[in-house]
Image (cartoon, rainbow, N blue to C red):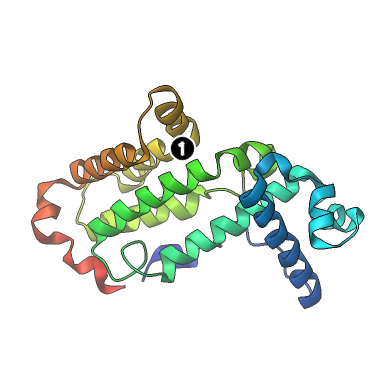
Amino acid sequence: MDPSRSLPMADEPARERADAARNREILLAAAAELVESDGVDAVTTEALARRAGVGKGTVFRRFESREGLMAALLDRSESEWQAAILSGPPPLGPGASARDRLRAFGRSRIELTLRHAALIRAAGHAGTRAYAPVAFAAMHVRYLLGELGVSGDLGYLATALLAPLEIPILEQQVEVEGRSVEAIAASWDDLVDRVIGSRSLRGSDGGAARR
């Protein structure tokens, strides 16, 4: 069994009444549409209230602040991404070899983190816990390393593999060094192959598709 299934999905909120949860989802969907059409800077509590057809006070009651709203958007995206890892199509989800899943994990994280860069900054401290829970990502990577027969301190290796996926490093590479997302993803693939070693590449990753 995948140990990451026992972990909470991206800071699961307290259970809400059905109508409250439905209203919250309507607001988040409207906010996501605003981000997509006009960018993060356009998402204010006033703009969201107008788009969703509710009062400004309703938005404040649901999210308390603009940062809280941004954090909720990140949490929504994070939950969808984690669900794709746990039960989505391969290679990110089950059904592919551990090597292919590890590669897909890094590539998807690179793309998602860069896509949400402005949102992460807007969320500020409120988004710290909403985005990329370390426990989930580290447990998933550690599990795949174990499936590949990698030896050594798997927890430390997982931490080392996750480090290049952090937003300051990715933004440095894209904005300062001028690297493309595809080039960064190719470097991730190379790093994965170096960590798992030739032993895994020769055939010890086949059993990872069992889950």
**Vertical placement of residue 103 versus 117, above or below:** below
At label 1, which amino acid type do we have? Glu
Instruction: Give neighbour class at mark 1: few <14, some 14-19, many 20+ (Cα, 10 Å).
Output: some
Res 125 → quadrant: top right
Q: Residue at x 81, y 45 (%)?
A: 65
Q: Nearer the viewer, residue 12 or 127?
A: 127
Farthest top residue?
A: 176
The x and y percentages for residue 126 are 69, 43
The x and y percentages for residue 40 are 66, 43
The x and y percentages for residue 129 are 62, 47
Provide the secondary structure element on which disc 1 rests.
loop
**Vertical placement of residue 103 versus 27, above or below:** above
Q: Residue at x 36, y 53 (%)?
A: 105
Q: Residue at x 62, y 55 (%)?
A: 75
Q: How many marks?
A: 1
Quarter occupied by the N terminus: bottom left
Residue corresponding to mark 1: 166
**Vertical placement of residue 122 versus 207, above or below:** above
The x and y percentages for residue 206 are 17, 66
Q: Nearer the viewer, residue 210 or 171?
A: 171
